[in-house]
Image (spheres, grey):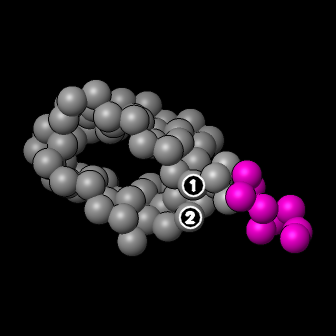
Amino acid sequence: LSIKHSPVFLLISLPVLTLIGNREMYIENIKTIMEYNDTCVKILTKRGIVYVEGEHLDIGYLDADEISVKGRIVQITFD
């Protein structure tokens, strides 16, 4: 079993989502923002795409591998 296929390695690269109600969301293990407007944020993570849909969405902060999305979050979808 190689290190890249070990359960620990796979968990480390998964996106980690933290929600505070439906008003704020933190996503760890991101690569880049693919799309951003006030109703949709599309984020490429190390393991797929996360779609955040809502109203008055805004990016609270962004660093090398984490983002914060604020606003009224209505739906989160994974692809």
Task: Judge whether residue 6 is colored magenta.
Answer: yes
Instruction: Give the amino acid at mark 2.
Output: Arg
Task: Find disc 1 in the rendering and name its residue.
Answer: 14
Query: Quick check: can you spot residue 74?
Result: yes
Q: Where residue 42 sits in the image (x, y, percent)? A: 35, 60
Provide the residue span drawn in magenta.
1-9
Q: Position of residue 47 (x, y in %)?
A: 56, 64
Residue drawn at (48%, 61%), measured in percent from left and top? 44
- The reply to whether the C-beta atoms of the residues labelled 1 and 2 are less than 8 Å apart is yes
- 65 within the magenta span: no
- Secondary-structure class at tag 1: loop
Which residue is at a point 52% across and 51% down the rendered structure image? 15
Q: Pointer 1: residues within 10 angstroms few (<14), some, or many (20+)? A: some
- Total numbered labels: 2
Residue 17 drawn above or below residue 50? above
Q: Is residue 16 left or right of residue 64?
A: left
Q: Earlier in the sequence, mark 1 or mark 2?
A: 1
In the shown orientation, is residue 6 left or right of residue 47?
A: right
Name the amino acid, label 1: Leu
Q: Are there few (<14), some (14-19), or many (20+) residues within 10 Å of tag 2? A: some
Relative horizontal placement of residue 35, taking residue 14 as reference (left or right):
left
Drawn side of residue 35 relative to residue 67, left or right? left
SS label for mark 2: loop
Rendered position, 74 above or below 6: above
Give the spatial CA distance, label 1 vs label 2.
6 Å
* Residue at figure coordinates x 87%, y 70% from the top left: 1
Q: Which residue shows up at 26% across the image and 55% down it? A: 76
Residue 31 appears in the rendering: no
The residue that mark 2 highlights is 47
